[in-house]
Amino acid sequence: MKLLIAYVSKTGSSEFCAKLIAKELEQKAEIDVIDLEKKTPKLEGYDAVVVGGPVRFGAFPKVLRKFIKNHFSELSAIPCAVYFCCGLSRISDEYSETLIPRKFEPSLGVHYFGGELKPQNAKGFDKMLIRHLRSSVKYHDFEDNEASDVSLPELIPENAHLLAEDIKRITAK
């Protein structure tokens, strides 16, 4: 089986998840892991495709949205999964329904892999925004305006593992 994992990563979380899936499947498939910011792969010859990236301001990065739009028919015709990373877990269900075009239903589903708020991996405005979000999540209780000790969002490697298991099942057929 030949698998493509195409991703966009702004601070490294989505890249980490792409490589995690690849590592889980390295014994079962020939895998290409491609950063869509650097290269746009052709989909011919792949038996399955996984695409993913971060959610920024409620949407995928433009290059990922464009990739899905331009390859809609091909992605619909083969086993396909979409994953996303986002530090706002409370609205991950909403993102699962709004990130991809309505008429596109990836046969292997849409998967939430959690997210991180690590400013050291960001640049410019993103770094400032992440610092602000960390501060808001970690230190403010919006209900009564008292300080709280809420844990910061984290990646959920188990979800990447579950997607890899789904892909293993289709390779066994």
Image (cartoon, grey):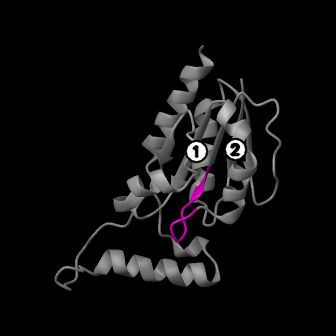
Instruction: Please tell me in which quadrant of the rendered image residue 1 appears.
Output: top right
Q: In the depicted view, which residue is nearer to us: 138 or 95?
A: 95
Instruction: Please give left or right for residue 90 compared with residue 110 in the image.
Output: left
- Figure quadrant of the C terminus: top right
Q: How busy is the neighbourhood of tag 1: few (under 14 within 10 Å), some, or many (20 plus)?
A: few
Amino acid under disc 1: Lys
Q: Tell me the SS state at disc 1.
A: loop
Q: Tell me where the magenta segment starts and ends, as one range.
A: 52-59
Residue 125: x and y, percent?
Answer: 60, 84
| Depth check, front residue: 164 or 70 | 70
Q: Position of residue 51 (x, y in %)?
A: 64, 46
Which residue shows up at 41% across the image and 56% down it?
A: 94
Residue 103 lies, with reference to residue 58, above or below; the image says above
Q: Nearer the viewer, mark 2 or mark 1?
A: 1
Question: In the rendered structure, are the residues bearing label 2 and label 1 in contact, judged by CB atoms less than 8 Å apart?
Answer: yes
How many numbered badges does the structure rendering display?
Answer: 2
Where is residue 143, by image quadrant?
A: bottom left
Instruction: Check disc 2 and report the residue beneath it.
Output: 72
